[in-house]
Image: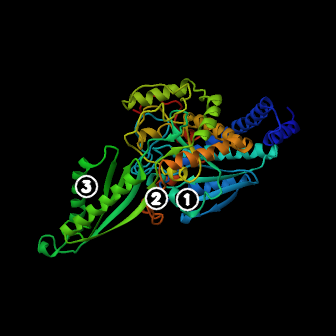
Amino acid sequence: MTTNGRRIAAALAAASLLTPAAQAAASASLKAQAIADVDAQAKQIQVMVDQVFSFAEPGFQEVRTSAYLADILEKHGFTVTRGVAGMPTAFTATWGSGGPLIALGSDIDDLLGVSQYPGTPEIKPMVAGAPGHGEGHNAGMPLIVAAAIAAKDVMEKNHIAGRLMVWPGVAEELLGSKAYYVRAGLFKGVDACIFTHVSSDFSVAYGDLGQNAAISVEYTFHGKTAHAAGMPWEGHSALDGVELMDTAWNFRREHLPVTQRSHYVITNGGDQPNVVPATASVWYYFRDRTFGAVKSMYDIGNTTAEAAAKETDTTVEHHILGYAAPNFGNKPLAEAAFANIAKIGMPKWDASDQAFTKAVQETNHRKVEPLKDKVTPLSTPENRERSIGGGSDDIGDVMWTVPTITIRFPSNIPNMIGHNVLSAMSMATPIAHKGAVAGAKAVATTVLDLMTTPKVLADAKTYFTEVQLKTDTYAPILEKPAIWLNEKTMREMRPKMEPLYYDSAKYPSYLDQLGIKWPTVTAAK
């Protein structure tokens, strides 16, 4: 089909004037263009994945990462608005006119204390104590950027009306941004959202996805200082308040639903042992399966804190640091995305990819399993196991605002530990690069479905209002974004990390810059 023929076919398809067979042929032609466009960006995807990995920035401190990705989108004709929703590292990048508005996003933050050299099977921090991409968020936004560029190119060439809004998930590990995006109105007028998350499989799901809602809250106790040996009776220990709260909470766990998850860290235990602490803080994550259940946990936590304060003659205040709604995927969007995933298929792994995978698993005593060669079947409420609770992802807040799905793309190794250095080992290697290319194709082709097939969007909206919204009511608990988090860490760590940033002008890949041979299958002597 000629270029003019494709334009005419796309226009006719949008107007529903073609036969089903002709519409399918026109759609296939558009998708082939998008896939070719992503393939043409494969080198740029590799560079983006490696660059973001090297920045290794935790929540609210994604300064280099955000600027780098926003600049690329701006150079490709997107209009970038920076610092949205009161967060310096948040942005939107928009393009297009008329037609549906489709949002595309993925997370950009990493985790504290999981710095790791990529492409080596041994645990080896790049900078001791520094953050690192032990979740693999470095591949998601490069994928989204490439998909958005590909979809834009096809839409421009074929005169397809529609709009794109690209956005980054800031501070996801802190549950820090998406509920605030919703509150700020970033998704007002959005017809559907496609989100991505790294995985070792290639999949999509709909319905209640089994992840917990979560509330991140810090309790700060205030007491009175005194000489801890000379006159301890004059003091009121804020640390005693923290420890009593923690002890009481641990007793209460026995009487909470099996679906709950709760964990904490003491963020301030006082100044020095011989001074009764006047201030002490503890940071909790409360998680459960529904909005009501997690609100109940939060209420119990507040009561427990107040009781601990009374027992220790201290006072206590609490502040919400983040929030995540339960995840609920949209059925028509998931079905459209799965059809594209099935046609794209898994990346073509080679012997080096499989050799590194096996080396990582054997070296770290994980179950040995090769990189997958088949896409995962569409996950539905009928074919997946019942959830008894677990992790959280604040994409749930977007899912309760507009029809949304998460596409999981294969850039990691099977059987790794989440939030751990093992999950960083493949994330700047050909495994991550190939998985991101595959994911970008799935996103771009699904965007074209939504732009050219009005029924998919109509069905998605019907499912959202008539199915999802009848299962629960969106009820976030928010204060203001905790943009100060991780500031101190990066002031200390960034100077040590900067010499290791990827120089793509000088080295073809990050592994080349680091002097790591691909595939490295044995630990260094």
In front: mark 2 or mark 3?
A: 2
**Residue located beneath label 3 in the image:** 249
Question: Which residue, given by chain and number where applicable, does mark 1 sit on?
Answer: 182
Residue at the image point whose x is 36% and y is 30% from the top: 365
Image mark for residue 224: none
184 is higher (above) or lower (below) than 454: below
Q: Distance between the residues labelled 1 and 2?
A: 10 Å
Which element carries disc 2, helix, strand or loop?
loop
Tell whether label 2 touches label 1 (CB within 8 Å): yes
Q: Can residue 445 be seen in this view?
A: yes
The reply to whether discs 3 and 1 touch (Cβ–Cβ < 8 Å) is: no
**Which mark sits nearer the N-terminus, 1 or 2?**
1
From this viewpoint, which residue is outermost toward the top? 351
x then y, percent, for residue 515: 53, 38
Q: Is mark 1 on a helix, strand or loop?
A: helix
Q: In this view, does 335 lie to the left or right of 156?
A: left
Q: Residue at x 71, y 35 (%)?
A: 35
Quarter placement of the C terminus: top left
**What amino acid type should be assigned to the residue bearing mark 3?**
Trp
Among the two numbered marks 3 and 1 on one chain, the one whose residue lies closer to the N terminus: 1
Residue 27, position as x, y percentages in the image: 75, 35
Q: In the rendered image, which residue does mark 2 sit on? A: 476
Q: What residue do we see at 73% from left, 36% from top?
A: 31
